[in-house]
Amino acid sequence: MNERKPGPKSGAATGTLPPEQRRREGQQRIADLENREQESTAGVAGITTAITDKQKDLKNLRARIATLSEKQDQILAEIEAKASFIREQETERLRHELAEIRTSHDKSLRDLAHQSKQLTDSVRNQADRLFELQFITKEQRATLLGLRQSDAATPASDWPTLTDLHGGYPQLASHLQRYLYRKQIIYPRAVLASFHALMLTGDFVILSGLSGSGKTMLVKSYAQATGNLAHIIPVKPNWTSAEDLIGYYNPLQCSYLTTPFLDALITAQQDPERLHIICLDEMNLARIEYYFADFLSALEERDEPPTIALYADEEAGHVHTEFKLLVDSLMDAGAGKDLQDLDAVLEDREILAKLKDRLGMDDGESVLHTHARLRRMVAGMLKVPSRLRIPTNVRFVGTVNMDATTHYLSPKVLDRAHVLQFQSPLNYWQQVIKEIGDSPLPETGVCIPATEFPREPYPPFAPQTTDAVSQALMQWADRYLEPMGIEIGLRLIRQAAAFRQRLSLLLEAGMSSEACDALVLNKLIKQKLLPRFSFDGKQPSRLGTLTVAALVSQFQEDVADRLKAAPEADAKDALRKLIKRAEANDGIYNYWA
């Protein structure tokens, strides 16, 4: 486009231009305007053409979109049709497979029932024959046939259950307390609640206190008040190995010599409906690690019932082989004869001769002697298997006194146990009377079957999401306990979480979470932490800047602060008394002193 030329100057100077020049400038201006008009017309035409082209492109694009949309609808319809067809085919296939599985399952059940009947009939025939030949007793025959004689109904079978309690589970400790008080047996409600919660956890429990403070009586009375059984096993000072606790296998007699402790385990195995509390009375008369180490380790197993090996499996195999040889020989020697019992065998000289010849007996050995020996061996094997599974309905409790005749508890034992400290019953009377008040005294306890005491795994541990109780314990371990020389591990944290879960069942429904945590911490301080206090407070702590006694003082302040919300906080008093005893004993801290 041509540049626009400047126009004539304004004012009087314009009028001074010659006419010819003015004419030429006018014509030039007209030509410029015409050029600009032509240029504008060409630009508009170009824009119009571009718009037309874009409109055509848009129309084509819309048509393409419509075509693609139609294709998409067709594809989706085809996919849905194929999916429906596949679903119908898969459903039909699954129905067919399910029908085949049901048919196979029904057939397997029929076959299994038939095989079971055959096996039962075979076992019954063999058991009847062995019973007739006096190899086994009537009770052993019932055991072989799975016909264990049920115990006679106990008075507790007519007692109310947990669901019958007015007020539910939180009223259990109160009900047990009032029932025992009616029988002149007194225990604070908190002691009964803690003991029941520990029975639910399945952990090892140690009852500590002066002689006559009611430790063994608690085990007996709790078992009786809940419709269960207690086995009191006195520990002797000369126990030095597991054999003193569970007996041993005598290779000369080919039989196992049992103990009251093992008999209690076997009884519990045969009576799964009730909880069996096995109490090792005065268990620290001997060193606990010497005779109870296997059980301390076995109790850590939570996923499956722990198993204790009693004797070599080969020994059971030897007895079985010798027993089978004698029985087969008896059957062969008496073939074709009507032998009703052992007397008929012993009176038949022909049978005795065949037996001696087949078994290679010496003249000095009689069939009766061999029979008696095998009878003892079989009785031992039937009663005591080579491996004994600790039943889930068993709980272990120990009582301890601390004096010149007993041993202190090692860290290994304390790490696996909860310690309940008992005071003299004279100190409980006023407290118990106040707790009972004017409430009626029930005539029965509460029937709590073994199914209410499952042995479950400990709660999982997650440091970032763990509960307030576990967080407090971990903080105390880092700030105070480890610098004092008291090592605690993951086992204690998981035990604490399990105890909190069980104890919360017995607390009042309206109790806040903060108060519940404080109450559980109060109990755990007494049960798990204070029993480990045994050190010289004058020694420097592992922090290096403070003595151990100074750390104990800081711990005392922290405990007092955390237990503000607890409805009972006697752990503060227990810690205060422990510190006072240490101050009077040249700075030596000893919980058991």
Image: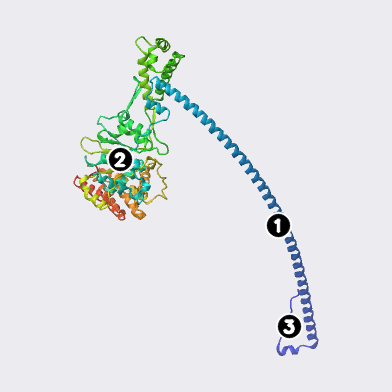
Q: Secondary structure at mark 3?
A: loop
Q: Secondary structure at mark 1?
A: helix
Residue 224 - label? 2
Q: Do the numbered discs 3 and 1 sit on residues whose CB atoms are within 8 Å? A: no
Q: Residue at 35% across / 38% down in the picture?
A: 275
Q: Which residue is mark 1?
A: 69
* Mark before the other along the chain sequence, 3 or 1: 3
**Displayed quadrant of residue 2:** bottom right
Using a 10 Å C-alpha cutoff, classify the residue at mark 3 as few (fewer than 14 neighbours), some (14 to 19) or many (20 or more).
few
Q: Secondary structure at mark 2?
A: helix
Q: How far apart, in angstroms, are the residues tagged by discs 3 and 1?
A: 63 Å
Q: Residue at 60% across / 37% down in the picture?
A: 100
- Of badges 2 and 3, the one in the foreground is 2
Asked whether residue 453 is in view, the answer is: yes
- Give residue 229's position: percent from left, percent from top: 32, 37
- Give residue 561's position: percent from left, percent from top: 30, 55
Q: Amino acid at mark 3?
A: Gly
Q: Amino acid at mark 2?
A: Gln
Using a 10 Å C-alpha cutoff, classify the residue at mark 1 as few (fewer than 14 neighbours), some (14 to 19) or many (20 or more).
few
Q: Which residue is mark 3?
A: 7
Q: How far apart, in angstroms, are the residues tagged by discs 2 and 3?
A: 127 Å
For the residue pair 11 and 540, the one nearer the viewer reads as 540
- Give residue 459's position: percent from left, percent from top: 41, 45
Q: Amino acid at mark 1?
A: Ser
